[in-house]
Image (cartoon, rainbow, N blue to C red):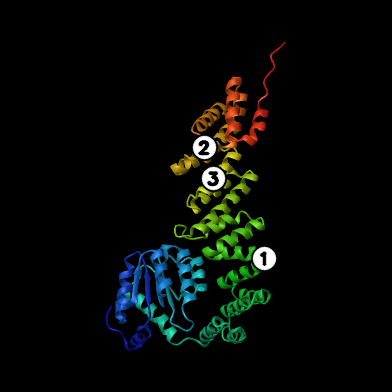
Amino acid sequence: MGELTKGEQKLIPLLKSARFLIVDPTSSRKSLRSLMSDFSVKPDQIEVVENVPDAMHVIEGRTPNVFFVEYTIGSQACFDMIRIQSERLEPGSLRAVFLITTQDSNSMVTSAATENVDAIIVKPFSFGMLKDRFCEILFQKLAPTPYVQALDKGRLLLKEEQFDEALAVFRQARTLDPKPSLALALEAETFQARKDHEEALKCYEEALKHNPSHFRSLLGSFDSYLALGKNDEAYVSARTLAQHHTIPAKRIPDMIRVSINTQHFEDLVGFYQTAGDLSSMDESIASHLGAGLVICGLHFLKRSNKDSAIDAFRKAEVASKQNPRILMRILQALVSAGLEAEMKSFMSRVPEEIRNSPDVQMAEIELLKKTGQNLRALEQSLRLIQQGIKVEKLYEIAITVSIELKRKDSLIEDLIFKAGNAFPDKKPYYESLHVKSTPPT
């Protein structure tokens, strides 16, 4: 903290009308505020928040030009917010992103580089280090390279739907950088805007030759393959993307469908692991991920891989935030497989209102019958019937188990009478379950 050099003072006009957002639940935000103060940034230009919902509210309202984000809020949330910022700011306007973290793993660096993160600031850092990095990035913004200028011009033309002009600019930009993956990706996006996915894919393929893990090109090629109905190729793009980057939350449902359509069930677990912060995930997307993981678990059960199936079901439970529909699918799978111990463990985690629901109690009864515990199955069946629960399968189990336990004919007939009243169209079926024994002559 202190006076600025003459060179640093040149940045003040650049920041005079800029908007700033600091997303940081830690004490580092104090240093960031002090940094802004040194460059004469006014308090009303700065928004400081500690969580994802508040940050999203700011970004969607007054999109910041300069964005500081602490990586611990969740990689998924970080990169989603950065994408929104990039989409909302006008081409050519000031845009800078600083990712603050205590780690600098290869996967994070790769994702950051392809998500237009300008700098990764690793903790612990001194105020001097922070200021030097901040100035370094902003000086680059003051004097952008011809390549960056060309990309900004092309983006503006693309936004204005001047496709031919945009293509010409992006093609010229290719000659201004030895590895023009971004220029090629933007050229591909221009073709996508014209619904020309075959030409778009040619550009993406060329971009990936320069950078095989280029985020924008992998995601774009996935979208084009999907649009052309090429599921196998789309799957390859999705899998490569998941190996190198955090998957954008909105793309998870499509990637799940592609993996299922191409019979690559095991990769659904990989999507879960790269989905980032699940707590902030949209309910619909979380349900898609949970449903996909249930399918993955069923696949493992068919292959007699019980441990992997249970792991997939547990992840489905977490991913879906205990969505009742997903919980029931897991329960039904455990019942069908006769996994009593696993079902008990699962039931201990299920919320009470779900655990006491008729559907769950029916599943428990079916498992008891499946595992030969007929007396307990009967007791629970009769209790539900007494409570007025009307389920076709419930009456069927109560009648068949009563017959197997050789209960009195009068008790069985009473059950059949109640079942016929509850489900008149099923009365002949219920009656067919009970054939009286003929007394010896």
In terms of secondary structure, where does tag 3 sit? Answer: helix
Provide the residue designation for mark 2: 361
Q: What's the distance in space between the residues labelled 1 and 3, CA to CA?
A: 34 Å
Q: Earlier in the sequence, mark 1 or mark 3?
A: 1
89 lies left or right of 336: left
Q: Secondary structure at mark 1?
A: helix
Residue furthest to the right in view is: 441
Q: Residues within 10 Å of mark 2 (few under 14, many from 20)?
A: some
> Looking at the figure, which quarter contains the N terminus?
bottom left
Label 3 Cα crowd, 10 Å radius (few <14 / some 14-19 / many 20+): some
Question: Residue at horizontal 44%, vertical 62%?
Answer: 74
Horizontal side, residue 424 vs residue 389: left or right: right
Q: Position of residue 89 (x, y in %)?
A: 46, 78
Query: What label does residue 340 carry, if any?
Result: none
N-terminal label among 3 and 2: 3
Q: Is residue 254 visible?
A: yes
The quadrant holding residue 10 is: bottom left
Q: To which residue does mark 1 refer?
A: 233
Residue 182 figure quarter = bottom right
Give the camera-side residue of 327 and 7: 327
Q: Which residue shows up at 64% across the image and 65% down it?
A: 234
Q: Is residue 54 above or below residue 315?
A: below
